[in-house]
Image (cartoon, rainbow, N blue to C red):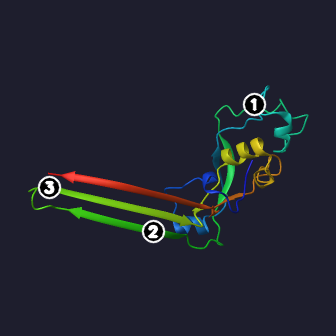
């Protein structure tokens, strides 16, 4: 099973905390452990025969695919030299209060809001397989390759993400 990537929604992306620009762009394709589940394996698969057919399981194979006893499946990973930089809108505001009528009192109020557009991230094998099985979405089902060998998992622009926070700190 393997997958490539294009544009995905922010909920569908996985984040790589160790990723660097060099890896995201130039990582050579390599086989690595990627997925941990396959609902189409075992004598009584968790997914239906119709759903598993979307991932390339034939009627003869359904119920006859051995589970991986280690719960690990291979995928092919690699960089994407077509990436453009992420873009973000960032807003911050801060306030510090040190009133003279309260000696040794300090209060800070900080707020930030960050929205990243064209987020650079990856798809994971588990997400691709489970989304294909649940929705029959050809975007995800087209990324599952059981017998032809895996297509690269590529780092790509993967939707957007946003966060905001309000922090209050008081000290005396």
**Disc 1, SS:** loop
Q: Residue furthest right?
A: 60
Mark 3 touches mark 1? (CB < 8 Å): no
Which is more foreground, mark 2 or mark 3? 3
Which residue is tagged 2?
90
Which is more foreground, mark 3 or mark 1? 3
Q: Earlier in the sequence, mark 2 or mark 3?
A: 2
Q: Earlier in the sequence, mark 3 or mark 1?
A: 1
Which is more foreground, mark 2 or mark 1? 2
Q: Quadrant of residue 72?
A: top right
Tell me which residue sits at (71%, 42%) in the image: 130
Q: Earlier in the sequence, mark 2 or mark 1?
A: 1
Tell me which residue sits at (77%, 55%) in the image: 139
Number of other residues with Cα within 10 Å of mark 1, as a class: few under 14, some 14 to 19, many 20 or more: some
**C-alpha separation, residue under disc 2 versus residue under disc 3:** 30 Å
Residue 127: give its label. Answer: none
**C-alpha separation, residue under disc 2 versus residue under disc 1:** 44 Å
Tell me which residue sits at (77%, 35%) in the image: 40
Number of other residues with Cα within 10 Å of mark 3, as a class: few under 14, some 14 to 19, many 20 or more: few
Residue 105: give its label. Answer: 3
Number of other residues with Cα within 10 Å of mark 2, as a class: few under 14, some 14 to 19, many 20 or more: few
Q: Position of residue 50 (x, y in %)?
A: 86, 37
Which residue is tagged 1?
46
């Amino acid at each position: 099973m393997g997958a490539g990537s294009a544009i995905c929604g922010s909920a569908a992306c996985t984040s790589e905390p160790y990723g660097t620009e060099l890896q995201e762009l130039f990582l050579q394709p390599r086989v690595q452990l990627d997925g941990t589940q396959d609902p189409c394996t075992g004598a009584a698969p968790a997914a239906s025969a119709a759903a598993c057919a979307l991932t390339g399981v034939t009627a003869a194979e359904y119920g006859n695919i051995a589970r991986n006893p280690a719960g690990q499946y291979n995928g092919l990973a690699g960089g994407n030299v077509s990436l453009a930089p992420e873009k973000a809108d960032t807003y911050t505001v801060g306030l510090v209060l040190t009133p003279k009528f309260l000696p040794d009192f300090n209060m800070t109020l900080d707020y930030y809001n960050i929205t990243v557009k064209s987020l650079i991230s990856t798809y994971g094998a588990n997400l691709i397989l489970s989304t294909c099985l649940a929705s029959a979405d050809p975007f995800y089902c087209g990324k599952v390759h059981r017998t032809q060998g895996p297509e690269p998992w590529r780092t790509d622009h993967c939707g957007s993400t946003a966060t905001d926070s309000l922090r209050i700190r008081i000290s005396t």
